[in-house]
Image: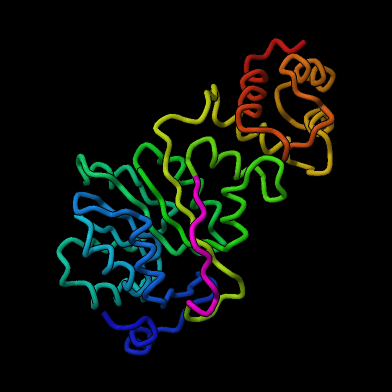
Amino acid sequence: MQSPLSLLRKHGIRPRKRLGQNFLCDPNILEKIVRIAGVRDTDTVVEIGSGIGVLTALLAARARRVIALEVDRRLVEVLRSELGGLSNVAIVHGDVLEYDFASARAEGGKGRVRVVGNVPYNLSSPIVLRLLDYRESVDRAVLMLQREVADRLAAAPGTKDYGPLSVTVSLYTEARLEMRVPASCFVPRPDVESRVIRLDMRREPLCGVDDPALFRDVVRSCFARRRKTLLNNLRQSSLPVRPEAVPAVLEELGIDGTRRAETLTVLEFAALSNRIGRGQNP
């Protein structure tokens, strides 16, 4: 396989900034990503943003099947030109936010489904949330993200990076930060540092959540104004709990209302969500 820069020149491709196109060109980093993904010859891999196919080819050498997702029609033609001879690669022109990951599970039979991708940084959160929606179909995701976003995904309670996405990711996955990747490893160079994160989907959520949609609303409401206390944020929320009932609900759960959202664990958020969902607020 030719280098990314050579392929771009060969096909006359100029990366499109609006699509977040920064092509990874460091062969050592590419190999490490494949190793982190832990791909076996019985696995199906869905690659997000296959670009010019450099990582795709490495995945195809190890996987039973690779589904190469690419939204840019120009790059789809490059993929077909460069990888058309690989029988285990299916090139799909489409948007990852509309892709049905359950179909990959169905095609894969008893094999595992791994998701790998150099994710457009402006779509990081929506893509991660979509993967969580399909957590029963995906076993592991290995994503290249803006470093700050990756740090937030894996952040622990009590840290400055801990936020709503950290809570949701922790509920459904075991997140592990991997190597940092400098801007010099990409063509063109992005304005930020990148980092690889590994998300292993939990067989069962970390704790019981009666209503996932309400759970997300509760978490967002608690973090609505980071410098405000839980008591203030919950009283000013649109959650199904009367403002005057909030102190008693928190007291019942043993949660100090003067705390801030970033100090709560996932288990505490779940207990709060479940309690609000049961109604009959004091």
- Residue at screen point 37% across, 51% down: 99
Query: In the image, residue 256 lies at what x, y percent?
Result: 80, 25
Residue 184 is inside the magenta segment: yes
| Residue 157, image quadrant | top right
| Left or right: 209, with 140 as reference point | right
Colour convention: rainbow
Which is the main secondary structure of the residues drawn in magenta? strand
Query: In the image, residue 262 lies at what x, y percent?
Result: 72, 40
- Residue at screen point 54% across, 25% down: 209
| Residue 224, image quadrant | top right
Q: Which residues are magenta?
A: 175-185
Instruction: Using the image as rendered, state which of residue 242 and residue 151 is in the foreground.
Output: 151
Residue 56 is inside the magenta segment: no
Instruction: Using the image as rendered, state which of residue 71 and residue 275 is in the foreground.
Output: 275
| Quadrant placement of the C terminus | top right
Query: In the image, residue 119 lies at what x, y percent?
Result: 47, 62
| Left or right: 30, with 18 as reference point | left
Total numbered badges shown on the rendered structure = 0
Q: Give the answer, above or below, for where 62 lies relative to 8.
A: above
Q: Give the answer, above or below, for where 241 lies relative to 3.
A: above
Instruction: Using the image as rendered, state which of residue 12 and residue 63 is in the foreground.
Output: 63
| Quadrant placement of the N terminus | bottom left
Query: In the image, residue 167 lies at what x, y percent?
Result: 60, 39
- Residue at screen point 82% across, 19% down: 247
- Residue at screen point 84% across, 19% down: 244
Q: Give the answer, above or below, for where 28 lies relative to 129.
A: below
